[in-house]
Amino acid sequence: MATTKKDTRLNNIIADLSSLEEKKIFTALKQLRKHGKREAITPLIDLLSSTENEDIKNEITTLLFDLKDQSVVEEIILALENDNYTTELATLVSIFWQSSLDSSEHITSIVKQAIKGDYMVGIEVLSVIDNYDTTFQETEVEDLKFDLDEAIEEEQTEKRDLLISIRMAIDALNLEF
């Protein structure tokens, strides 16, 4: 299969994300706004979690918060479940409410992030749940309530109150019986 001009351009942009030259990285980030595709999500998240440069982190975060392509949801969920990105969990979860991408099919994965993550991850999970405007399967919601009840019982920090708030938000979801 022949490589198209667009594929070559995207591959070059993705390669530039790994550059040691900041100028090349910023140019690549600008190019992704115009020519980005789903394939660029993982390299973007790799760079987000590996760079020390706050300007680059901010630029990537802004780009991720502006996503409109629903097909990237799977990539972001995979990143959430990847232990290599634990330092960026709050940012990854916040993409869903910041960009208005629908992550409702992955509510279980998202709530599990609140249970295992830190306080900030929990805040972002609560924001995502508060922005859901869909109907959920009763069995899935009941399983989530059970998992949250267990986590609330075990939690000894201020995160406990946050988990209770998440539990209340889950209670308020629309259910399909």
Image (spheres, helix red, strand yellow):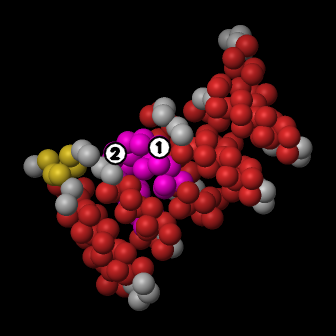
Tell me if residue 44 can be seen. Answer: yes
> Which numbered circle lies on residue 28?
none
Q: Residue at x 75, y 22 (%)?
A: 9
**Can you tell which of label 1 and label 2 is closer to the viewer?**
1
Mark 1, residue position: 99
Asked which secondary structure carries label 2, the reply is helix
Q: Residue at x 78, y 57 (%)?
A: 53
Extreme residue in the bottom direction: 156
Where does the magenta region start and end? 92-114
Extreme residue in the right direction: 21
Extreme residue in the left direction: 177
What residue type is disc 1 on? Ser
Left or right position of 128 against 172: right
| Predominant SS along the magenta part | helix
Q: Residue at x 69, y 56 (%)?
A: 49
Q: Residue at x 24, y 69 (%)?
A: 168
Asked whether 99 falls inside the magenta stretch, the response is yes
Tell me which numbered mark, 1 or 2, is placed earlier along the sequence: 1
Quarter of the rendering containing residue 43: top right
Asked which secondary structure carries label 1, the reply is helix
Where residue 82 appears, as percent x and y from the top left, is 57, 56
CB contact under 8 Å: marks 1 and 2: no
Q: Can you say whether 149 is above or below 144 in the image? A: below
Tell me if residue 46 can be seen. Answer: no
> Which numbered circle lies on residue 105?
2
Q: Pointer 1: residues within 10 angstroms few (<14), some, or many (20+)? A: some
